[in-house]
Amino acid sequence: QVRVVESGGGSVQAGGSLRLSCAASGYTYSTYCMGWFRQAPGKEREGVAAIDSASITWYADSVKGRFSISKDNAKNTLYLQMNSLSPEDSAMYYCAARSGSFCYTPRRQPSAYDYWGQGTQVTVSL
């Protein structure tokens, strides 16, 4: 059974940093596409960052230069380092996995993913 569990959210002041983690289990971690998404109240879920099997990454324009996605295949864990946070980054953050024998390109759309975590809240205040 595939399972992804996020952690690391919290409250931080603007300009601060947080690192989110996503622990995965139940599948061959390195072969799956992985991604981070976020959803603020009243808004659609949006892609934040994604990574493929070769560790090629994609970032939303709004987070480029501030966020960094990475993975540790030995630990079956995905990370999202978030720096220079602003109130606009406040949202529920979700980790997602797309099943497959190999991920050839980072997937940006929520509809591309099969498995989702329960989310971790990030709140940034002025």
Image: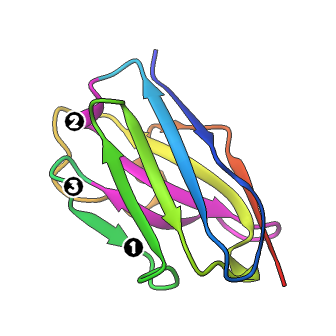
Q: Of the residues shown, which amino acid type is indicated by label 2?
A: Thr
Q: Looking at the picture, how far across and down is residue 97, in whole percent?
A: 41, 40
Which residues lie in the magenta part? Answer: 28-51
Q: Which mark is residue 55?
A: 3
Q: Of the residues shown, which amino acid type is indicated by label 1?
A: Tyr
- The residue that mark 1 highlights is 59
Dot in front, 2 or 3: 3
Up the image or down, 23 lies above or below 12; here it is above
Q: Is residue 12 left or right of 74 when viewed as pictured?
A: right
- Earlier residue among tags 1 and 2: 2
In the image, is residue 37 part of the stretch drawn in magenta? yes
Callout 2 secondary element:
helix
Cα–Cα span, label 1 and label 2: 20 Å
Point out the image quarter for the C terminus. Answer: bottom right
Dot 2 crowding, Cα within 10 Å, few <14, some 14–19, many 20+ = some
Callout 3 secondary element:
loop
Q: Quadrant of residue 106?
A: bottom left
Cα–Cα span, label 2 and label 3: 11 Å
Q: Nearer the viewer, residue 12 or 119?
A: 12
Up the image or down, 47 lies above or below 114; here it is below
Q: Is residue 71 left or right of 89 when viewed as pictured?
A: left
Q: Looking at the picture, how far across and down is residue 25, in whole percent?
A: 43, 22
